[in-house]
Image (cartoon, grey):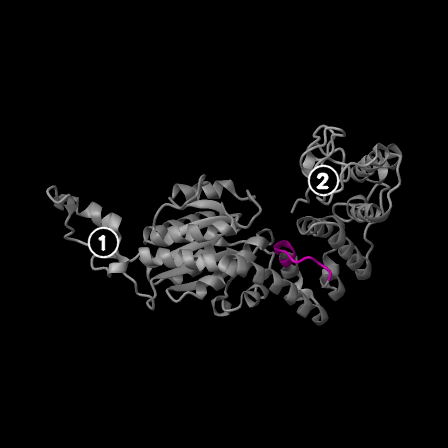
Amino acid sequence: MTAPQDPTDPTDPTDPADPADPAGPAGPTDPADGLGTTDVLGTPRAGVPGTQDGPVPAAEADDERLGRWRLVLGPDGAGSAGRPLTGGDAAMDGALTALYGGKEPGGRAGTGRGAGLGASAPSVARWLGDIRTYFPRSVVQVMQRDAIDRLGLTALLMEPETLAAVEPDVHLVGALLSLHKAMPETTKETARAVVRTVVEDLERRLAARTRATLTGALDRSAATGRPRSRDIDWGRTVRANLGHYLPEHRTVVPERLVGYARAARSVKKDVILCVDQSGSMAASLVHAAVFGAVLASMRTLTTRLVVFDTAVADLTDQLDDPIDVLFGTRLGGGTDINRALAYCQSRITRPADTVVVLVSDLYEGGVRDEMLKRAAALTASGVQFVTLLALSDEGAPAYDREHAAALGALGIPTLACTPDHFPQLMAAALEKRPLPVPDPV
């Protein structure tokens, strides 16, 4: 994973606080000083028209302006700013310097700036507490991720007091899953609590909409010529009976009704989620486990969850608890997509009613030609086959473009998908209609 650019580095050409970009991330600018109307925490600045504190003397406004530039420039800018930091500003500066000024990515000592976070769990726990005090949640999550990447703090995640201080998020769950086999018993329960917090948050955000969307799709996928009155599709019924239009009555007499069959207790579709558990797919694995549990709770679906690296593990019997699913995975290792597809193929009994979702970046370590032949065979048998290069909020993922193009040439939709978009994508797959994506790979 590539660490984000240092937000305090004045040499970063994309830095939103660059003097060449006076608006920056802080919002609208004050024409008097070219800085934002809010401070680095997003709270209104004193002395700016329209803020809560009203006008302040020019000397105080100048002092605040220098303090803001001092935070932007970091410790190396102390001389040019000509103003020492105090109070909350000093604490923010210390937290930023410990992370972005202490060491270079990979844990190497930096070039004379900052002291780093140290190697003890108590010092890291204090730092985690500081950043939660002085920065908003979204920034805290980015800084935690950078601390793991830049300063090599992965081992300290096995300390209960460190875990108790973190802000849970999907990326932290990925780090914990990669470590859980090596965790001491004293840390495992704390780690499960962190994972549980993230999973429950995802379920609250995604479960209800997923069930509602897919229930409607399943109802629409079962067309019938003898629908109940509440299940008649009047638009399709009118179009099917336009030949029976009576001009004198200005009406259509429907000889054939078109609607949906509702068999609430019968299984209509089979879904197989086949998920790559290599280290780069951690966020996608977390979301797939949550969606797998949601789909498994729907009586009109049978859902199977298969995870793979160079081996294949079927975690279907654990789908009632996505936390057990996640702790049953092992992030890292190689990738053998062909073997995983072979296993999925052996479990398909109703090809025309089966949706296979492969979640992988397609960096195949197995036999490429066999993988493509198997994918083609699944599609030819009637299986609705979809490849997700990522199931996360991260945007465009890194993936094997040659393999993605080869699958696309077979007619297999190959795309990245955010969790919020997944219900609509699955609904389209269940109904066998074109997937609602703007730019398939």
Task: Judge left or right: residue 144 versus residue 340.
Answer: right
* Rendered residue at 38%/50% (across/down): 428
Quarter holding residue 222: bottom left
As rendered, which of 244 and 278 lies closer to the eye? Answer: 244
Mark 1: few, some, or many residues within 10 Å (few <14, many ≥20)? Answer: many
Does the magenta-highlighted stretch encompass residue 208?
no
Task: Judge left or right: residue 274 versus residue 248.
Answer: right
**Amino acid type indicated by mark 1:** Val
On the question of residue 167 being in view, the answer is yes
Magenta extent: 165-173
As drawn, the label of residue 258 is 1
- Measured along the vertical axis of the image, is residue 108 above or below residue 293? above
Q: Position of residue 179 (x, y in %)?
A: 67, 61
User: Nearer the observer, disc 2 or disc 1?
Assistant: 2
As drawn, the label of residue 33 is none
Q: Position of residue 156 (x, y in %)?
A: 75, 60
* Rendered residue at 19%/47% (across/down): 240
Q: Position of residue 154 (x, y in %)?
A: 72, 57
As rendered, which of 176 and 52 lies closer to the eye? Answer: 52
Residue highlighted by disc 2: 51
Residue at far left of view: 248
On the question of residue 334 being in view, the answer is no
Badge 2 marks a residue whose secondary structure is loop
* Rendered residue at 73%/54% (across/down): 132
Mark 2: few, some, or many residues within 10 Å (few <14, many ≥20)? Answer: some
As rendered, which of 266 and 280 lies closer to the eye? Answer: 266
How many marks the image carries: the answer is 2
Quarter holding residue 36: top right
**Amino acid type indicated by mark 2:** Thr
Question: Between disc 2 and disc 1, whose residue precedes?
Answer: 2
Q: Position of residue 320 (x, y in %)?
A: 50, 69
Badge 1 marks a residue whose secondary structure is loop
